[in-house]
Image: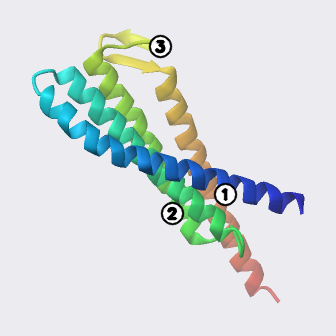
Amino acid sequence: MKNNLAKRSLTTLITIITFVLGVALIISVFAGIPYILENLSNFNNITSALSFFILGITFFIILILLLEIASSSKNSIFISENVKRFKFIGYMLFVNGINEYITMLVNGVSGIRIFDLAPGIFITIGMAVYFIVALICFVISDSFDEAIRIKEDNNLTI
């Protein structure tokens, strides 16, 4: 009972966030195109606008995948589609880390840097978080894959 309530609450929260982010992305397209056209000469502004748009799209995709994972858990969470979904979420998080790196290169590094070897060679806290969470998604994906394999082996055992 308590588990179902938590699952429904999380699914509802993810659905609301996905809807709000989707509306924000649609608005940003209509507001962003005139902004980019007005600032064609300012490369930093264009880079920032495109960076935020890419970030929004990747988070929207991640939220959709999380909704699909949550809806698939009604039958069995350990299915091959969820393995693919977690891997794709990991790739999206890597894209976000690279996106942040490119934005920092163009606009200048702001905030705390964990690693700063030379100009252009740095890691910020945000990039480290994206990298670590992406690795966690890959570990979850591999764990699900192993669980599926064990489940199939057990189904074949008499």
Asked whether, in this view, residue 84 is left or right of residue 156, the answer is: left
Instruction: Name the secondary structure under disc 2.
Output: helix
Pick out the residue farthest to the right: 1
Proximity of marks 2 and 3: CB atoms separated by less than 8 Å: no
Which amino acid, by three-letter code, is at mark 3?
A: Arg
What is the distance, in whole Å, between disc 2 and disc 1 at their CAs? 20 Å
Who's the residue at 30% across and 10% down the image? 119
Pointer 1 local density, CA inside 10 Å: few below 14, some 14–19, many at least 20: some
Which amino acid, by three-letter code, is at mark 2?
A: Lys
Q: How is the image coloured?
A: rainbow
Residue 19 at what x, y percent from top left? 51, 53
Q: In which quarter of the image is residue 76?
A: bottom right
Instruction: Name the secondary structure under disc 1.
Output: helix
Residue 29 at what x, y percent from top left? 28, 44
Residue 149 at what x, y percent from top left? 66, 71
Which amino acid, by three-letter code, is at mark 1?
A: Thr
Q: Determine which residue is flagged by label 1.
A: 11
Q: Earlier in the sequence, mark 2 or mark 3?
A: 2
Asked whether, in this view, residue 16 is left or right of residue 28, the answer is: right
Asked whether, in this view, residue 108 is left or right of residue 18, the answer is: left
Residue 75 appears anywhere in the view: yes
Who's the residue at 31% across and 25% down the image? 103
Who's the residue at 60% across and 57% down the image? 142
Pointer 2 local density, CA inside 10 Å: few below 14, some 14–19, many at least 20: some
Proximity of marks 2 and 1: CB atoms separated by less than 8 Å: no
Q: In which quarter of the image is residue 95?
A: top left
Q: In which quarter of the image is the C terminus?
A: bottom right
Residue 78 appears anywhere in the view: no
Q: Determine which residue is flagged by label 2.
A: 84
Q: Determine which residue is flagged by label 3.
A: 113
Who's the residue at 67% across and 57% down the image? 11
What is the distance, in whole Å, between disc 1 and disc 3 at their CAs? 35 Å
